[in-house]
Amino acid sequence: MTDFVLDWEREKRTGVAEAVLCEGKSVAQVDAILGEAGERRLLLTRLDESKHAGLAAAVRAKLDFDPLSRTAFHGAPKAPALEGAGIVCAGTSDLPVAREAARSLAFAGFAAPVIADVGVAGLWRLMKRLDEIRTFKVVIAVAGMEGALFSVIAGLVEAPVIAVPTSVGYGVAQGGHVALHSALATCATGVVAVNIDNGYGGACAAIRILKRGA
Amino acid sequence: MTDFVLDWEREKRTGVAEAVLCEGKSVAQVDAILGEAGERRLLLTRLDESKHAGLAAAVRAKLDFDPLSRTAFHGAPKAPALEGAGIVCAGTSDLPVAREAARSLAFAGFAAPVIADVGVAGLWRLMKRLDEIRTFKVVIAVAGMEGALFSVIAGLVEAPVIAVPTSVGYGVAQGGHVALHSALATCATGVVAVNIDNGYGGACAAIRILKRGA
Amino acid sequence: MTDFVLDWEREKRTGVAEAVLCEGKSVAQVDAILGEAGERRLLLTRLDESKHAGLAAAVRAKLDFDPLSRTAFHGAPKAPALEGAGIVCAGTSDLPVAREAARSLAFAGFAAPVIADVGVAGLWRLMKRLDEIRTFKVVIAVAGMEGALFSVIAGLVEAPVIAVPTSVGYGVAQGGHVALHSALATCATGVVAVNIDNGYGGACAAIRILKRGA
Amino acid sequence: MTDFVLDWEREKRTGVAEAVLCEGKSVAQVDAILGEAGERRLLLTRLDESKHAGLAAAVRAKLDFDPLSRTAFHGAPKAPALEGAGIVCAGTSDLPVAREAARSLAFAGFAAPVIADVGVAGLWRLMKRLDEIRTFKVVIAVAGMEGALFSVIAGLVEAPVIAVPTSVGYGVAQGGHVALHSALATCATGVVAVNIDNGYGGACAAIRILKRGA
Amino acid sequence: MTDFVLDWEREKRTGVAEAVLCEGKSVAQVDAILGEAGERRLLLTRLDESKHAGLAAAVRAKLDFDPLSRTAFHGAPKAPALEGAGIVCAGTSDLPVAREAARSLAFAGFAAPVIADVGVAGLWRLMKRLDEIRTFKVVIAVAGMEGALFSVIAGLVEAPVIAVPTSVGYGVAQGGHVALHSALATCATGVVAVNIDNGYGGACAAIRILKRGA
Amino acid sequence: MTDFVLDWEREKRTGVAEAVLCEGKSVAQVDAILGEAGERRLLLTRLDESKHAGLAAAVRAKLDFDPLSRTAFHGAPKAPALEGAGIVCAGTSDLPVAREAARSLAFAGFAAPVIADVGVAGLWRLMKRLDEIRTFKVVIAVAGMEGALFSVIAGLVEAPVIAVPTSVGYGVAQGGHVALHSALATCATGVVAVNIDNGYGGACAAIRILKRGA
Amino acid sequence: MTDFVLDWEREKRTGVAEAVLCEGKSVAQVDAILGEAGERRLLLTRLDESKHAGLAAAVRAKLDFDPLSRTAFHGAPKAPALEGAGIVCAGTSDLPVAREAARSLAFAGFAAPVIADVGVAGLWRLMKRLDEIRTFKVVIAVAGMEGALFSVIAGLVEAPVIAVPTSVGYGVAQGGHVALHSALATCATGVVAVNIDNGYGGACAAIRILKRGA
Amino acid sequence: MTDFVLDWEREKRTGVAEAVLCEGKSVAQVDAILGEAGERRLLLTRLDESKHAGLAAAVRAKLDFDPLSRTAFHGAPKAPALEGAGIVCAGTSDLPVAREAARSLAFAGFAAPVIADVGVAGLWRLMKRLDEIRTFKVVIAVAGMEGALFSVIAGLVEAPVIAVPTSVGYGVAQGGHVALHSALATCATGVVAVNIDNGYGGACAAIRILKRGA
């Protein structure tokens, strides 16, 4: 039985290229997929350090790997990097997810600054960066715990706000469901949500928005 | 079998007087309780209009009934009304719960202004009232939906913030659990929560704080 | 105490004008809000037939009310209607939510065709309309039950897909959580979600996307 | 106290032979069960590599062990292998479960091809294999994440579709509940579900269908 | 916008004909669907008595309506009725769901006896009917509360057991989730489940099994 | 601050002696508690092998430790062992919990045979032991997965049935909630439940029943 | 098809006689069951006032109906009433459930006093009745909300405590799950639980205990 | 991108100084934060032993670290320690959380005695300490399992009771949700709750109460 069928026409069909979710795949499977890819470009997500270390040396040599975001580029990012997206991040612990979004955007040819640690407990931190945030055409907001950031930002800017809830938190917040539900139940308009910890998904939605709106 | 045992010593023991939760009790039971009370003061909560209308006329004549908050005073509020508590309310639909808190405080001898419709979707509404809110010794914050108000207020004031989540909302917010969880998972400090729609409980906590802190 | 504070600057700040969620508000409160509005434009959502019937006659005379979607226009829709958004709907029972989205877009000056009953149980129905769907700059997909439509569409088009899960279904699907979770857990890219039955929210996100992308 | 009572008459009674779920049993217990079995045939499921390694050498020598599916054959598969069942698998990460189904069928005397990586994000992959899938008398569909595959397949084939949801996924999909619920809430007909990750259970249901239908 | 698209080719494609779930559809929509159907056969499910009473008289005259199961036949059942399926029902309160299954089978041309009130609290009731149950090629088992019947039957017969959990029960059993989960977590083999209260779905699965196995 | 206060009067007050739940306590705390106990009898529960190994040698020397049930006796079991209780166990994997119950009973002076592996998938195994089970004055039934055993037994015997659900199972059964809910939602009478995996709690309830009933 | 099969041997087999849960059964079905019963004794539970009023006059004439507990006796209670059970009830709103337990015991020949309104918010109310409670051989404790009563009583008496959680409460307590979980998670020993609002089930367990212990 | 923005004005604004939640932050990030802090005071929470051991030696030298509560002081506690708060703790296993509260209070300049192991299973332990507990101006109550302690204490004292539910427990109590829900659903007044295991949050609320009430 063949284990995988790569969807090389996906970018043409949907505007976003095929990527490989490495979580749940064995080292051998990732090696095989990259072998099949040859010189073609591929983004790898959720590739943790130990799995990366286990890949064949020849494969590893061709990857631009970032351990914090657990992403790897197989092939170079598209150039030149286009502007329009921005990432706003509630706390330091949310950075791996924010960076997964930033790297996914970068590989697809979009530059996206990350504005970190602007959670609402100290609202001045957000206000200080508001003018910059208002310049984005699409905002990716990354937050865990109670996710109040989503509503507050959406009430202050014109861009659509893609909420990426994170699993940062404990007790009732464990696993990220409170942040997700806050994004969905928001009293503000213009907030849409992707799955918990899905920085890649937030990036893909931003890419579709930016590509189709151009 | 005797159906009820009133706890007349409760105020001496805990600082908060006995009250009667009318939900789940029959009209006959409420009539009997008020008969037993005689001239003694009692607060009635969750007394809806139809149950109130069903009470014996003599009983009804002795009640100061407020249909919005579903509360009734049996006996006069304590006087003079003491200051220190304030109620902040996210939306118009949260007012029944906010008013239950206000009436419970009033009956116990505490005046508490209600600052309504200051939800975070339009942050300027909250900011405009911030100086006033900062004067309170204890803030009761009432909000449904995603409950972002709790975190935002707690990051801006010195008083303890008693979050009263409400069941206002639909979809994932149905029943008030998102607002409750936002209060508990807050990134700010100084937020404590009571049960969903429990304006009376928020008031009781405020009373204990104000009485013991004096 | 004042019950409401309208946010007339919201459109300037966020691109989407203030609207009034009528669910949870009394007839008297809706009357008062529309009195305060005067000649200003306002969208009313979740205004069911009986509440509409209870409004003051003078108020009702000024409303363009649609019972299926439970929406009312206070003031005329913006003109001319701009193109770019399209609504795709899985089943007949999802139409009230789809129409809430369509009416919210229309009031804000955006035309959006509704393509109904293209659920995946008969995939040919969707395929037959695919060329038309591919012309949209943003797709609002409305589905209840298992919500498989979200993933299937997102795999076939370039536009961002705003999933509006509905509460259509019973048993495990009761309340719309399965459709919502399918949107969030999708194996496709470019799907973002709003709250269950939130056609208005789906429309607002589309408006932000279309306005900022222009 | 005796720890186990093997049900050797199960095949005669139900058409499916006794099997041993090794998860939750100690190495000593598995050794004892195989000792008791003697020359009789037994299927072992959820036997992970470390537990297999811990078994007595004599026991291990008699087992045909497959680490990916965590299954072992004690005794030879029935022959000749009968046709009629087919396994369709959404993604590479679902293969361990698909293979548990295939091995369980094989041991009972049924051949079942596995058609892998035909998830709906790239619908053409499924369409390409549709003619083959339509030849099956019973389809075992294996999918995690949002499980849209179950509905799409059931709308295209005549065979009953046994959905085996998998725990592949994260965030709201964690643990496989979204895929399970999608199978149950499907808008298509002819889908039935077994427990999450229960490839063995899917195979047993297929065996009963094929045996009784013959 | 057209509200519905009937899938007349469904029977050819999947072996089970198009049916109309009336729950969530307005009287006007059901009238329109039956108008479109003309002389073609259609099964209607979840048509409650008041909705049936509201249909146009001409439409109603053409329906064979059964209030207990909330089903209606538009056109005659297929004949002659084929044997092979049997329905086993735990308690009297489960009968509406059992009858929905029986009527759905009957319309499609399959006779299915209903064996009622054989719940496991009095195991002799089931044992007394066991010989008859063992003659079925496929068993549809209908049970609410704790759903122990599913496992007990599956341990005693050779046929596949389609579990239809019902919402009969209160407290933890409210809504049918315990019965559903018991079917999925069963220690027996050969049990598959459909959604709660989905007698129609159980019948459709049985039809696919009987048609493909013939 | 003192870490613990032993309740030496508990047996006199409630009929069941103080015991120490070791899970969540450090080795140092367990050592200290046993030091404080001196020559007094104490039952230790949830003492896993590594924590037992970490205890002071002098303490360990005084313990009768059983790793399967994770229990230890500090002091001798009461004698002579009284009869009346019996333990019935669905599967081999439930034995650690069954044995926790048996050891807890033994320490308190009650003999309780364990009848293992009589799950309902092979009903004959239970029927074969039924005469013996009917002699018990109180039955402790231990089962995971779907917990059908609780209802079946309760329909066949006169004794009260204390259901001890276990966390044996996966998918929807993970953590034991399905078995617990089956015990609570049972269609049979005379079933009462304790917490998941709480063999000790099942034993304590049996002790109270046997002591008060004598 | 026959709708019901009464289990007249149940009392001989289990010590507790057959009873009829009227919830979910139609008036016609209850009439038919009582017709079948003839002169035999039967307890009816969850028979609400409107269903009782709908029964055939001849049937109604033979029933001793109690609307608060929704129970009816068909035939006389057993005499003389045996002692040993006692019912302790947290609040006035829990009385319907407490009375269902008391009536179920009475019909089976057991007298059980109800001690009402002894919730832990005013602990003195419980302490005042403690000597009486300590005389019971089995305590049925009925409580909603947080269910703290179960643990407190079990720490003070020797009898087994059958916790009957009620659905009294709102917010997180809605439906009775908090009270149920408190009973299961208790830090005290000797507490066992039945389903929420299941006063009848609590009584049946008490009957088995008292009959077998005698 | 800068990873963090410390909020040095937080104490002036809210009365509670900035603190660092170390869970979810890397050793490098904690090192960097403390580098940025320089001589300024900071409380560190959820700093487990291995992360503490990984910090730069120079950083570690400046910390007063307590492994049980996983807290560290960077800078000296405020002096003199003010009185008014007291901590009451149900069981030995709850001590890490209780101590997190005590250390957080101490760093902010408040002395708070911890009264341990006064769970309600042995009510005399609580009663023995009641006079002391009644002297507190605010009580922090720490309990896991069923959390009955919250209601019992609140019924006996005048001070507000801040419930800190802990994740101590198993089965239904796993993760602390039962204790949390008991605090929220309490039948007593004056109980407010913070997140599960959030001793730090309980302390912050107490600080706000004591500071504003003075």
Image: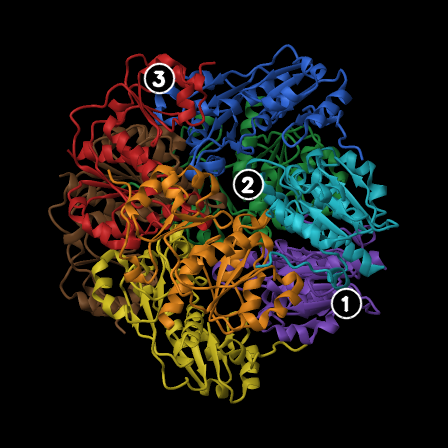
Chain colours: A green, B cyan, C blue, D brown, E red, F yellow, G orange, H purple
Q: Residues within 10 Å of mark 2 (few under 14, many from 20)?
A: many
Spatial distance from mark 2 to mark 3, Cα to Cα? 54 Å
A185 is higher (above) or lower (below) than D171:
above
Q: Which of the numbered marks, if any, corresponds to residue H136?
A: 1
Q: Residues within 10 Å of mark 1 (few under 14, many from 20)?
A: many
Q: Which of the numbered marks, if any, corresponds to residue E209?
A: none
Secondary structure state at the residue bearing disc 2: helix
| Mark 3 chain | E
On the rendered image, what quadrant is the C terminus of chain E found in?
Answer: top left
What kind of residue is marked 2? Gly
The residue nearer to you, when weighing H101 against F152, is F152
* Label 3 close to label 1 by CB (< 8 Å): no
Q: Residues within 10 Å of mark 3 (few under 14, many from 20)?
A: some
What kind of residue is marked 1? Phe
Disc 3 or disc 1, which is closer to the eye? 3
On the same chain, marks 2 and 3? The answer is no
Percent x, y of residue C163: 51, 30
Q: Which of the numbered marks, if any, corresponds to residue A199?
A: 2
| Mark 1 chain | H
On the same chain, marks 3 and 1? The answer is no
| Mark 2 chain | A
Q: Which of the numbered marks, if any, corresponds to residue E60?
A: 3
Q: Is residue D73 visible?
A: no
Q: Is residue H84 visible?
A: yes
Spatial distance from mark 1 to mark 2, Cα to Cα? 47 Å
Secondary structure state at the residue bearing disc 1: loop
